[in-house]
Amino acid sequence: MCGIVGYIGTRNCVPVILEGLRRLEYRGYDSAGIALVRDKEFFIQKKAGKVSNLAAALGEAEGTVFATLGMGHTRWATHGEPSDINAHPHWDQKKRIALVHNGIVENYQAIKTKLLRDGHTFLGATDTEVLAHLVGVMYDECRDLPTAVRLALSEVDGTYGLVVIAKDDPGRIVAARKGSPLLIGVGDGENFIASDASAIVEHTRKVVYLDDGEVADITTSGVRTMTIDDVTVEKPIHQVTLELSQIERGGYDHFMLKEIHEQPETILNAMRGRLLVEEGDVKLGGLQNIIGRLLSARRLILTACGTSWHAALVGEYMFEQIARIPTEVEYASEFRYRDPIVNIDDVVFLISQSGETADTLSALRDAKTKGATVLGIVNVVGSSIARESDGGVYAHAGPEIGVASTKAFTSQLTVLALITILLARVRGMSRERGQVLARELATLPDKVQTILKETEKIRKIAEEFKDAKNFLYLGRGANFPVALEGALKLKEISYIHAEGYPAAEMKHGPIALIDENMPVVFIVPKDGIYDKVVSNIQEVRARRGRIIAVANEDDTDIDELAEFVIRVPRTYGFFGPILNIIPLQLLAYYIAVARGTNVDQPRNLAKSVTVE
Ligand code: F6R
């Protein structure tokens, strides 16, 4: 979703901002802009389309533009189409201040009506332009930028990550946050502001995370942080551990392919120092203080969106089957508005790669208000969900840049498996049983490596089906969520319509779709319900559907039934999703490549969905 990067210091900020915007491209956007202050005048350039358009318009190659104060923005359209005019930054009526904004001003229409009555004119259709005018009005009155921002925000309903500069006050950047992440990069004689650490990590690793309701006054010499009511807040400086190599493509054609191939390592990282194979147990520092509450929990609730919701569905199988704890899964977007019954002895897990998804964050706050214990399974360290949870477990997948989630999913599943073993042990599972599960979990990175050797075969299958109009994905038990996730991956990046179903549900409707043009992907491991899934395969065969099977290495019967077979090693049923999703990620990837789509930044999608 939208990205922000800003700079104040002594060097030329243009390359800093453009490079920062490039690092934010993965978040998904449709226009970009920059505002610089030079000799107390604004230089603003905004372009629909990619950051490269903006850089070309700026004459980046010639390096002619120089400024030591500036900010840039990538916009993902909500109010108003993607266009040069609607791109940020926006000015106020007198063009004295410029502003970039992530989030939504919900009462912008009421504010706009009042401003129109006062003679303001608006160039575009965005809520942000209205906010810029409002800050401008306040600035006219008080002539102090931090005060103007605070006064304006006291009239605003909605969410924001906001950065403002004034041309006649070139010594400061003012930033404010409510519901949309912002962090300040602390440098030596220079400071940065960004919506995501990846935009500034090559310049500084020292960051201050702004919290909701806070405003920052950033100058070259320091940062003052205050509440909207002007109460000073002392903020700790955190050290970001992100490596530059982690946010570069490293020789792969796409981030998504790199991230798929990183999975043996990222799954291992999720277990490292946590899985105690000999003890048949698990140690999770982030749950240590609330283990008592987990022990006495009568019910677990897992809530998330998208791919993370699919991880939650697998988690439900693990928690119920192994730890024997009643578990419910719900979309965070539904949870937050349903006024669900949440008891103080419930434990609510929020699963999120970014840790910033607006719906998931709201579900967390709702559950917290109702007295439940809230725990995060989050990938991005220091993100809002991580900071607002009572405890939790980081996924440790490293930065995920491809918009379609891959390695974060398998890391989430690994963390859920760890929590399952932990819960089962504290609730009485024997050490021996724990050892058996822990030993098997420890083998998964090598097994993923084995699956990655199927890549060439999967690429050929992708060639065969690249022109398909529809796909069906079917699986049972813990592999039903894998079917959902396989279908989601395909539609996100190839734009082929795909649906996932529990295999046995097919005959209740989707079977009407089966003909010789319908590819059907079956996830069919040799488990207790193998024969049942084989019956479903027969039903598809009888209607001439084209079958692609993800099956175990030693399954010799499947060759007779499926047109294409992708082999995966055996594992326990509830760990199976960690392996079975890998070929489906690769299948989606190679189909998208064959169709020539923008794999890493698919149309209309954003990496982190910070609006409702
Ligand atoms: C799919 C995908 C999205 C996210 C969803 C939740 O590939 O990436 O469906 O899973 O937007 O995002 P997080 O996990 O960041 O809360």
Image (cartoon, helix red, strand yellow):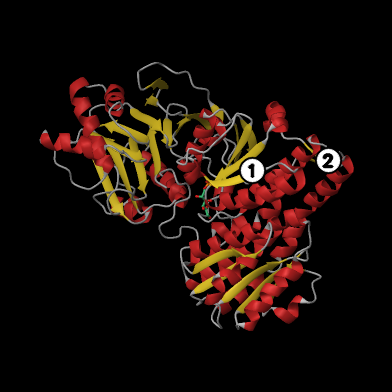
| CA neighbours of label 1 inside 10 A, class few (<14), some (14 to 19), many (20+) | many
Q: Nearer the viewer, residue 58 or 394?
A: 394
**Which image quarter: residue 551?**
bottom right
| Residue 93 x, y percent position in the rendering | 17, 36
Give the mark, 2 or 1, whose residue is nearer the N terminus.
Answer: 1
Can you tell which of label 2 and label 1 is closer to the viewer? 2
Q: Which mark is residue 395?
A: 1
Q: Secondary structure at mark 2?
A: loop
Q: How many marks?
A: 2
Which residue appears farthest toward the top when viewing the image?
231
Q: Quadrant of the C terminus?
A: top left
Amino acid type for the residue under numbered disc 2 = Met
Q: Which mark is residue 429?
A: 2
**Disc 2 versus disc 1: distance between alpha carbons?**
24 Å
| Residue 313 x, y percent position in the rendering | 62, 51
| CA neighbours of label 2 inside 10 A, class few (<14), some (14 to 19), many (20+) | some
Q: In this picture, is 556 found above or below 404?
A: below
